[in-house]
Image: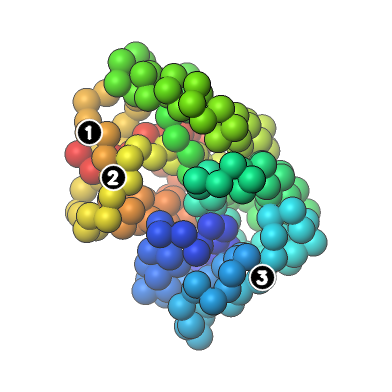
């Protein structure tokens, strides 16, 4: 299938692009710095900023699914465009009739299916206190995706590592038993799987290695 990837130049995004190409998909990557992406006959790149709605729409047009691994980095100035970019992605998908949207987030995005988990609850409180700009952006992005009226899935991620891809990924609700770590390779694999799998349609699974 033809897939558009946002955030494809980050550590997890690069793995996502490579896995999609390996599985035979045609990939359109939207990137501010195209030179960070590999060259491949089935990979096309649209260069642009997240606040350029026309270029975002050009990247989305003709695809069957959009996968976004956009997330706050260490620079506060890079955070606000993530919200603008997510709104542009949703608008472009509606305009071009692309239904499937898979976006990553964190447990800062609440889900009605969650139960109490003191470790995750403490982590969310610390982030909201010491990184309020990033916290607000993540929560806002989650709301935009949920209210998009698209066929969405929000994949909530824990601490990421450079570990290997494994055969098993623990997709669960906050409050259920599991670790708080996930390899980027597993994150990429799970996000890619959701392009064609509707098990978590209109849901926000929290995924970890164990």
Q: Which residue is mark 3?
A: 47
* Among the two numbered marks 1 and 3 on one chain, the one whose residue lies closer to the N terminus: 3
Residue 114 pos. (x, y %):
39, 20
* Among the two numbered marks 3 and 2 on one chain, the one whose residue lies closer to the N terminus: 3
Cα gap from disc 1 to disc 3, whole angstroms: 37 Å
Please report the residue visible at 40 percent of the width from the left and 70 percent of the height from the top: 18
Residue 65 pos. (x, y %):
57, 57
In-front residue for pair 161/69 = 161
Q: Judge the density around disc 2: few (<14), some (14-19), many (≥20) Cα neighbours within 10 Å.
A: many
**Res. 113 in view:** no
Q: Which residue is mark 2?
A: 182
Cα gap from disc 3 to disc 2, whole angstroms: 30 Å
Residue 159 pos. (x, y %):
33, 40
Q: Secondary structure at mark 3?
A: strand
| Side of 26 where 185 appears, left or right | left
Cα gap from disc 2 to disc 1, whole angstroms: 8 Å
């Amino acid at each position: 299938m033809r897939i558009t990837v946002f955030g494809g130049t980050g550590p997890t995004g690069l793995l996502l692009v490579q896995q999609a190409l390996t599985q035979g998909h045609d990939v359109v990557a939207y990137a501010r710095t195209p030179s960070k992406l590999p060259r491949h006959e089935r990979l096309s790149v649209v260069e642009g900023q997240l606040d350029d709605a026309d270029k975002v729409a050009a990247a989305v047009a003709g695809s069957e699914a959009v996968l976004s691994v956009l997330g706050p980095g260490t620079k506060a100035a890079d955070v606000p465009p993530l919200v603008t970019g997510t709104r542009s992605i949703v608008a472009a998908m509606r305009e071009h009739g692309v239904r499937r949207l898979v976006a990553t987030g964190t447990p800062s995005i609440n889900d009605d299916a969650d139960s109490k988990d003191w470790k995750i609850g403490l982590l969310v409180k610390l982030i909201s206190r010491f990184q309020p700009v990033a916290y607000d952006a993540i929560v806002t992005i989650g709301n935009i995706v949920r209210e998009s009226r698209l066929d969405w899935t929000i994949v909530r991620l824990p601490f990421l590592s450079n570990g290997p891809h494994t055969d098993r990924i623990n997709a669960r609700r906050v409050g259920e038993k599991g670790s708080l770590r996930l390899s980027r390779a597993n994150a990429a694999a799970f996000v890619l799987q959701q392009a064609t799998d509707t098990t978590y349609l209109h849901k926000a699974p929290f995924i970890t290695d164990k």
